[in-house]
Image: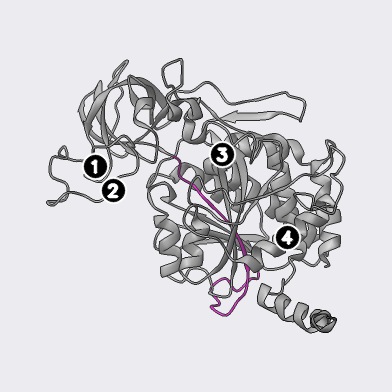
Amino acid sequence: MTTQAGAERAIALITTDHPRRDEYLRWAMELTTLPTATGREGRPAAWIKEWVEARPDVAMRTDEHFNIEVHFQGANAADPDAAPIYFTAHLDHPAFVVASVGSPTDALLEFRGGVMAPYFEDARVVVHVGERTIAGTLTGKVYDPKGDKDAGNPGPQPEGGTEGAPEGTSGVFPVFACEFDEPAGASVGDVATWQLPDAEVTDDEFGGILHTNACDDLAAAAAALAAMEELRLARAGGMDVGDIRLLFTRAEEVGFVGAIGACKGGFMPKNSRVIALETSRSFPHDSPIHGGPIVRVGDRVSVFTPELTSAISEVANRLAGRDSTPRATEQAPAPGGWKWQRKLMAGGACEASVYCRLGYTSTCVCLPLGNYHNMADLSAVQAGTNETRPRVGREYVGVDDYFGMIDLLAACGLGLPETPSFAERVEKLWDERKFVLGEG
């Protein structure tokens, strides 16, 4: 299957009459509203397991670190010499885990993730006890492993390690006291999340915005599953689909721990091409929502594998009929049509840096995200110009960007080219054009 044919088929998803469009949006809504936290990703993992069990032509396996791989039946998943393409996403989101329970109405909560300190003050949360939710209020921070303004990113411990940490807590993460509105019946290990309005899709001139609890990274996980569904149906219809696999990792928000484990344990063959999926903070004038999915060339830690980034960019070019940014010798395209972006996105780090560092060919595709890590009015809070008290809010992504990510992944599954390295291109340019140097 050629890349062009893959592009022609996958582009149908951006049309409003695609037969599975509503279903794929429902998957995003369901996954992004499931309570999840680092080390407590059981609910989205169970959702994925049910998804796999409903499809006899796909299968799943897990590693010792509870990472999940989804692959087509018949693939030799454990073959170390295989060369699959992976779409990867993480299943955790910044949230609280009950560390100890003092009484039916109070508990200590560890926060696992990165959120600025002002957002915790008197914040409202809900603890998830089985199918019940009980609201409460944070009454103060009782332990901070490094004592600075960034409550969710613990740094090196002082000598003595976890000295001063409340009994029953890990000593690695900040701890907050919480008083519940009513007896909660909470237990150690229960997940607590911010108290947020119900998820919804609001209309706008570009086709809508999905406002929900945890786009990062469950919206990308839903997009990966939707792309796999398109490829599964294409395969059943006799189309040539490559060895496409999904990898869902754990504990990304506290240092990519699940991804590191997957690499160190050899869960992915070393010949894999790994496309990490993320939802990354949008900046309106650089990486706007409704600008299309972003082929991310790097993050604040590293740049990714250039050849794989270029290969995905080639697929995106074919979908859009143009490059992400017009060259100086080109006319700007007319508004509308399939859109995409190519950006560095240096405001944070992602698992692609881990995969590259540990020997894999890897890059990233991401969705531009609003209210990053649920921090509303974040730019003003960071600048100290906010006129209202910092408060958490629902994260949000463009519906068109979400479907654009599905399109791009499906097209990659139907024909991701082998892109020559830049070194090869340099040699080719030299061989073809060195004659001009002798013209005087």
Q: Which residue is mark 3?
A: 31
Reply above or below: 54 against 118: below
Q: Residue at x 72, y 72 (%)?
A: 418
- Image disc number at residue 146: 1
Marked residue nearer the N-terminal end (4 or 3):
3
Q: Which residue is mark 4?
A: 412
Quarter in which the C terminus is drawn: bottom right
> Magenta includes 195?
no
Residue 269 image position (x, y, % from top left)? 54, 73
Callout 1, which amino acid?
Lys
Circle 2 — which element?
Answer: loop
Callout 2, which amino acid?
Gly
What span is in magenta?
Answer: 74-93
Kindly indicate whether the residue at mark 1 contacts the one at mark 2 (C-beta within 8 angstroms): yes
Kindly indicate whether the residue at mark 3 contacts the one at mark 4 (C-beta within 8 angstroms): no
Q: Residue at x 80, y 52 (%)?
A: 328
Circle 4 — which element?
Answer: helix
Give the number of the mark in front: 1 or 4: 1
